[in-house]
Amino acid sequence: MTTIKQVLDRKGHGVLTVQPEDTVLHALEQMASQNVGAVIVTENDAPIGIFTERDYARSVILKGRSSPTTPVRDVMSGEVVFVRLEQTVDECMGIMSNKRFRHMPVLQDGKLVGIVSIGDLVKTIIDQQEFTIEQLKGYIVGNG
């Protein structure tokens, strides 16, 4: 079983963070510059929330708020569920599916060490399946 550590080792451990007092516009600019759909909101280096494109659509646009003046604290999701490096892709996918999350921060020893998206997990699963298919093809034709 592939672990979250293996996923992060492949994609990178970088995590985009913002402060709760940063504006929504600042968070969106950071997200756009890195081509990501979420940022972790931290205070004193501890994760306290997550701000996603979905939060922007539902809590800013639909409520007529202003991106340049609204602090992230007012529109972030405060319920942050984490995964650990040793958890499997299947475990993480189950949590994300049940909770309807698209992004999950990764903690190790209480420290933020990465973030995984549903896309990262789907890509990992597809890669595993392609490898298995190639192994089975080799076995069938007698090369395995």
Image: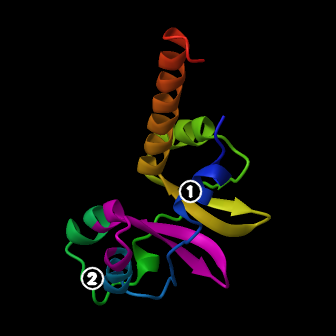
Quadrant holding the C terminus: top right
Q: Which residues are magenta?
A: 32-56
Are the residues flagged by discs 1 and 2 in contact, CB closer than 8 Å? no
Image quarter for residue 44? bottom right
Question: What residue type is disc 1 on?
Answer: Arg
97 with respect to 53 (left or right): right
Q: Is residue 5 inside the magenta stretch?
A: no
Quadrant holding the N terminus: top right
Pointer 1 residue: 10
Q: Is residue 107 visible from the viewing direction of this image?
A: yes
Q: Residue at x 39, y 71 (%)?
A: 75
Residue 135 percent coordinates (x, y): 54, 23
Question: In front here: 82 or 6?
Answer: 6
Q: Is residue 41 inside the magenta stretch?
A: yes
Image quarter for residue 24? bottom left
Q: Residue at x 52, y 84 (%)?
A: 19
Establish if 44 lies above or below 144.
below
